[in-house]
Image (tube, rainbow, N blue to C red):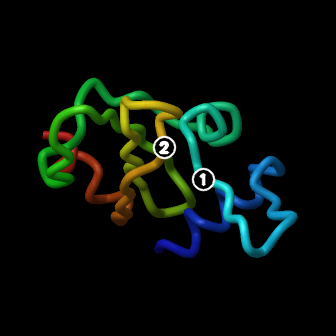
Amino acid sequence: MLRITTALLLAATPALAQTDAAAPLPMTYEIFEGTVLHADLAECPAVMEAGEGVFCRLAVAGENVAVFVFSEAGDQPLVGMRNWPADALMPLLK
């Protein structure tokens, strides 16, 4: 499941093409927002235990859904992610 979402992000994100193997590029919300088709979530699903100072976005990749957690601070870096089968979507959003 993680491979599908990771492949989707990399295929859809030319800005993430790494030019220096020693310097990984962080996934910021600015990059994510412009390259990944997603839905804004009013709040992070409880199962994420995301805490304060973060926001979540939901993306669908094939038969899977992924919730991405971004920090509200600084450049809004990606701080967490989790995948589920698409049929688990409704219980996840409760």
Task: Name the residue tied to disc 1.
Answer: 26
Which image quadrant is residue 28 in? top right
- Where in the figure is residue 86, as x and y percent of width and height? 38, 58
**What residue is shown at x 56% (from left), y 63% (from top)?**
5
Q: Are the residues tagged 1 and 2 within 8 Å (C-beta)?
A: yes
Identify which residue, 21 or 54, lies in the foreground.
21
Is 67 rendered above or below residue 20? above
Mark 2 residue type: Pro
Task: Name the residue tied to disc 2.
Answer: 77
Identify which residue, 15 or 12, lies in the foreground.
15
Is 88 rendered above or below residue 74? below
- Where in the figure is residue 51, as x and y percent of width and height? 15, 42
**What residue is shown at x 41% (from left), y 38% (from top)?**
57
Q: Residue furthest right?
A: 19
Mark 1 residue type: Pro
Between disc 1 and disc 2, whose residue precedes?
1
- Where in the figure is residue 64, as x and y percent of width and height? 45, 62
Disc 2 crowd rating (10 Å Cα; few below 14, some 14-19, many 20+) is: some
Is 38 rendered above or below residue 10? above
Q: How many marks?
A: 2
Secondary element at tag 1: loop
Per the model, the C-alpha gap separating discs 1 and 2 is 7 Å
Secondary element at tag 2: loop
Q: Is residue 38 left or right of residue 18?
A: left
Q: Is residue 42 left or right of residue 3?
A: left
**What residue is shown at x 66% (from left), y 38% (from top)?**
31
Disc 1 crowd rating (10 Å Cα; few below 14, some 14-19, many 20+) is: few
Identify which residue, 25 or 81, lies in the foreground.
25
Identify which residue, 62 or 69, lies in the foreground.
69
